[in-house]
Image (cartoon, helix red, strand yellow):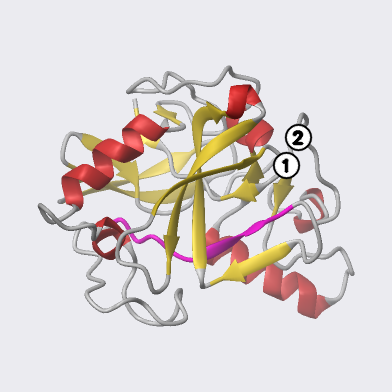
Amino acid sequence: MTHLLIILDERDGQIYSTVRIGDQIWMAENLRYFPGFPDPTSVNLPEDGSTTEPRYYVYGYDGSGTQENLDIAAANLINYGVLYNWPAAMAGAEGSNTNPSGVQGICPDGWHLPSEAEWVQLTDFVRTPELNDAANKLKETGDTYWISPSPGTTNEFGFNARGGGARQGSDDYYFNLRILGHWLTSTEADGGLQFRAVWMQQDSPSGGFNQGNKDFAGSVRCVKD
């Protein structure tokens, strides 16, 4: 693991820490960019879903306009980033499972949305040989961002994975904050009707891959080109 200098996203002035893990350089934080930053009312309401048009959510934001709700949304934006549906994450690009993906998507210039193949490269590199413990090596330690991290959680590569929850397409829209993290990939599934995602869970040492409908919204990590 080699910690690198922070990078500046010139679109909104936000900065991110980065980390080299094996032959890849990853953002060490979830992406926080959304059109209209920093106005929280520019993000979509949880009930406003789409499988074809970009949607941007912040966990807990419900549009009520109360200071309490705005404060909750602001804290979740800083700590967990934006939740993107697949059209937002891809920014009009075609699906890809090559390594590298070749899909910039929602990521800043010089960075790209990783494919499932790139996440497999990461998890294969960090896990202990013969063990399925990749999530333990990537999850942030302590109970601030996970309710109860699994024994053996080390974050030894400085990836800082957090349980940012997700936005699903039915009641209750926001779910699993500090329990699950989902990260979108550029890879399609089910003949293009769904996409592939990475998941890590508070009490699971391994994590894994699954797939969901394109209105499902999760976190994004970007990889350097």
Residue tagged 2 = 51
Marks 1 and 2, how far apart at CA: 4 Å
On the rendered image, what quadrant is the C terminus found in?
top left
Relative horizontal placement of residue 211, taking residue 155 as reference (left or right): right
Residue plotted at (47% across, 52% down)? 30
Q: Residue at x 68, y 46 (%)?
A: 216
Could you say whether the residue bearing mark 1 is in a helix, strand or loop?
Answer: loop
Q: In the rendering, which numbered label is found on residue 1?
A: none
Residue 148, given in percent of the width and then of the height, sits at 41, 82
162 lies above or below 152: above
Give me the residue at 76% from left, 65% from top.
61
Callout 2 amino acid? Thr
The image shows residue 64 at horizontal and vertical percentages of: 89, 69
> From which residue to which does the magenta span run?
159-168
213 on left or right of 112: right
User: Where on the picture, by quarter, is residue 36?
Assistant: top right
Q: Magenta-highlighted stretch: main secondary structure?
A: loop
Q: Element under label 2?
A: loop
What amino acid is found at the position of numbered circle 1 in the picture? Asp
Q: Which residue appears at 26% of the width and 42% of the height?
A: 122
Above or below 193: residue 199 = below
